[in-house]
Amino acid sequence: MSLKLKALLKSPWVFHLSTGSCNNCDIEILDCLTPRFDIERFGMLLIGSIKHADVLLITGSCNRMSVERLKALYEQVPKPCLVIAIGTCAGSRGIFKDSYNCPVPLDKIVPVDVYIPGCPPKPEAMIAGVVKLIEKVGGAK
Amino acid sequence: MSFKLIVDALKNPDGFFASTPLSLLCAAFAALFFILIVIYSIKHMKGRKGIWRYYIYTIATFASTLGVLFAANFMILLIFWGFLGLLLYLMIAFGRKEGTPATARKALIIVGATDVLMLFGIVLIWKITAGSSGFQGLLHMPITGMGIPLSGTASVIAYLCFASAAFAKAGAMPFHTWVPDTAENAPTPVTAYLPASLDKLLGIYLLARVTLDVFQMTPTMNTILMAIGSITIVAAVMMALIQHDLKRLLGYHAVSQVGYMVLGIGTGNPIGIAGGLFHMFNHAIYKSCLFLSGGAAERKAGTGNLAQMGGLVKAIPLVFMTFLIASLAISGVPPMNGFASKWLVYQGVITSGDSLWVLWLIAAMLGSALTLASFMKLIHTVFLGQPSEGVKKILADKKQKGTGLSTAIPLVVLSALCVSIGVFAWKIPFGALFRPEVSGPIDSPGIWQSGTATLMLIAGLVIGYLIYLAGTLKKARVVEPFVGGETLEENPDMRVSGVDFYKTIMELGLLKGIYRWAEKKLFDLYVVAGKFVAGFGVIFSFMHNGILSRYFLWFIIGLVVLCIVLI
Amino acid sequence: MTFVYLLVFGFAATAVLGLITSWIDRKVTARVQYRVGPPFLQPIIDIVKLLGKETVIPAGASKRTFLIAPVIGISGVIAVATLLWVNQFFSEGFMGDWIVAIYLLAIPSLSIILGGFASRNPLASLGASREMKLVIAYELPFILAALVPVINAHSIRLSVIIDSQAGGVFAGNISGILALTVAILCVQAKLALVPFDIPEAETEITGGALIEYSGPGLAIFKLMKNMLFFVLPFFLIILFFGGLRLNGINILWTVLEYVGIVAIITVIRNTNPRVRIDQAVRFFWGPITLIAVVAVVLALKGL
């Protein structure tokens, strides 16, 4: 495993991107920062600009307005970058599967590395998902 | 009479003309600016009416400047000084803006009025020193080595008369108001030539000459000079912060920087005086560079209104570079030349022993920070930031990109001087160059180690570059800026022009009221004096209203007064 | 010789100490919030990671200015760090290096502003303009506070300021305490930490002036900020505590002083909300300048 990748996995800065979610998942993401879970232990930071991001946390069901913006934003992330789909909506469009407003599932727009199901997923589930992602990426190379 | 005097002087220069190291240096700089301005004017002034007159005025200005610099006689000095005021008027009139005539008149009146004060000062000196030698004595009074003590009222008034002439020429407060107006309304080369370089050189040269050669300064007068300098620095730069016109903003900086020179000369010790004079040369370099760069940007954008500029760096990268270097120099960022001279001024202030030195030092250092602030605003609004609609059209047109040779040469020369004088400042022998104004030794604290500091900064740059090399610079990718997934092209209202960056400061408590007064021109001596004169007019028209009974009233009052006086 | 000092102290030592300081800051923050906090090597890992990331340049930006801005910033910090180290251990500064240090300390802010302006992002422009306003706000009290040791030592040579505190540190006087208080608040603003993190304001303008930086550019900026986090407290220690004293029991004192200043900054940052820019300007030009003026007057009276 190269030094670059090792450093990336030890300091993944997450950017939080909502594509039309109901805000429940977003609130649960913020929970991960609280003293009880404290993801900074793993070097994770929630950052404001997508240009600083290593990991995109995507929530929501990707409505029509979001699709092109999501494409544009994925272009803007400096690579290498990982994508985590958080919540049932992001994973499978959930109950909005047949909605006129959600034409494409998330993984048809951008490549997704990990799906964390739940409506909303628990912070523990998110942390477990991230750890699995780190193991997957770290183990693969 | 004046022509006869000049002819006499030219026939027999002894006693009329003399050169000192300082005046030679000033003349060399004047020649440099003369050449650069002529080169710049080739393109900038092309196609104006009566362009040959413009070049004649330029040459005449240069000649008069030499006359002032080498004059060894008060009358010769005054004559050339007066020519310069007139030439300033004529050259401003080449502007094509709405306010040009009024501006030219304002400059002429302020400079002319202070010329009269100077004549008064000369007569006073003649009275003090050689009152008995008749009118011929007045005509042949030498400048050098008088050393009149500032003890009596007459000598103080004479000094103040000379100082106000120097202040008006250099643009220090309270005679500064013609400088921003000229900057806004005169053609760019004229502004760069006269208020930015030659008038500064002459004004500060005269101030140094009079302060150090003709009179013997007292601590009180030094304190007054330092106070004027400090107020000029801070007040002018505060006004510059909120301007909306590119060249007017630069004009206020031209005023603000004079403060450092006056402050330096006011310290009364060799270091400070050397700093003030050194700052004069540095200022002439970076200020004319700024005006010429700003003029090139204005010409490219077709407007001087800051709100309609922006993003010009893509069209004229060279001008951006020179403007950036000159603005770092004027803000005194090490290792540029502005820092070297400001450093000397600070040293002078600290060692001056004045009881209020902390105040002057703070004013000078804060002035630097504020200068930096207002130049950052300019750099954003003119060159960086997002292009305005007008600039977008220019950027789309390939033909309009680039800088012409006649514009580029002066800019490159001046900005190269900014850097090289700054880097090699510690090698400059101030004692030899600035004689006789700087007489004492300035070796004890010396000049700051610009060489060492530059090496440190260069090593820092190399380290930074190495870090870049360790990274992934080569595979850089160009993407849209991040504004939450929107695109800037589709949202023109997302453009931040930067004109109102410092509105927050303008609306701050006490400052709000001061700025409002300044907008009403309550600090403009010209406007206030104008109102004063107009007030006289009201009184006179009240007295002469053509009604017989009122004339009778004056008649009777006059009689009564006459009776009282006679009895 | 200067180059040796530069490479050994100016860069390497400052960088290491700066990264450690940054870790202390993050760890204390975490402890204040009852969290565990990041591991010790986290700051250096962040930098290494950023170096490995791709560089993206915003379209339509002034590419050269955008890329050179971080380098200018770090060179300023390296220069001022070298100046301080040389004064600390070799007494080899030059006359008036106090002025030079204060001017060089403005270069990092300048580079952030230039970088923000060059990135053609409206949010970055706003952030950079706030940074500029913050600079003019804190510069006045900062200069005043830094003048107090100069008045006390009758010199603007840093090495003389250090030497003249051999008998008793300036922080022991009333004027020194007042000036130190003011200076710490100014350092807070210089580092753009809460409550003066207005230029970066992650929740509002998403990183401000640094919004467009990624990869090595951001790494250099982060490193610069970390180094500044060491250099500024170090500057205060030189001015008010007579420099780092590394003999006998004094080592303990030095470490205590240093960690104390950093801890105060961190605690302020963790117990305050962000202020608006006009509030910050009002704060610095109002009460803080007043305190600084009082300190200067007291120092002139010899207190």
Image (cartoon, coloured by chain):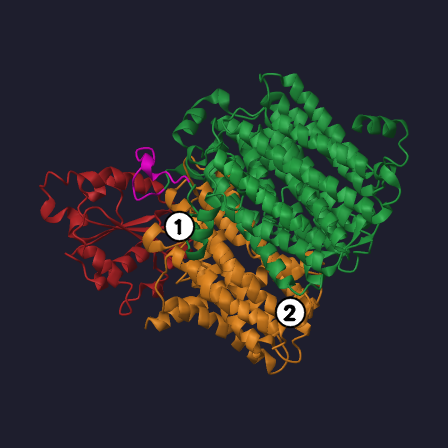
Q: Which chain is red?
A: A
Number of marks in picture: 2
B34, B360: nearer the viewer: B360
Residue A108 location, quadrant: top left
Mark 1 belongs to which subunit?
Answer: C
Task: Give the distance between the C-alpha atoms of the residues marked 2 and 1, in whole angstroms.
Answer: 38 Å
Where does the image place residue C42, in percent across and percent down from the top left?
Answer: 43, 63
Q: Residue furthest bottom?
A: C249
For the stretch drawn in magenta, the main secondary structure is: loop
Image: B490 above or below B217: above
Classify mark 2: residues with Cα within 10 Å, few (<14), some (14-19) or many (20+).
some
Q: Amino acid at mark 2?
A: Ile
Residue segment shown in magenta: B482-497
B160, B315: nearer the viewer: B160
Residue at (36, 67) in percent of width and height: C272
Classify the position of the N terminus of chain B by image quarter. top right
Residue topped by disc 1 = C208
Residue at (63, 18) in percent of width and height: B51
B315, B524: nearer the viewer: B524
Q: Which mark is residue C151?
A: 2
Colour representing chain B: green
Residue A128 falls inside the magenta stretch: no
Q: Indicate which label's residue lies in the foreground, 2 or 1.
A: 2
Q: Are marks 2 and 1 in contact (CB under 8 Å)?
A: no
Q: Amino acid at mark 1?
A: Gly
Residue C252 location, quadrant: bottom right
Secondary-structure class at tag 2: helix
Q: Which chain is orange?
A: C
Residue at (62, 70) in percent of width and height: C149
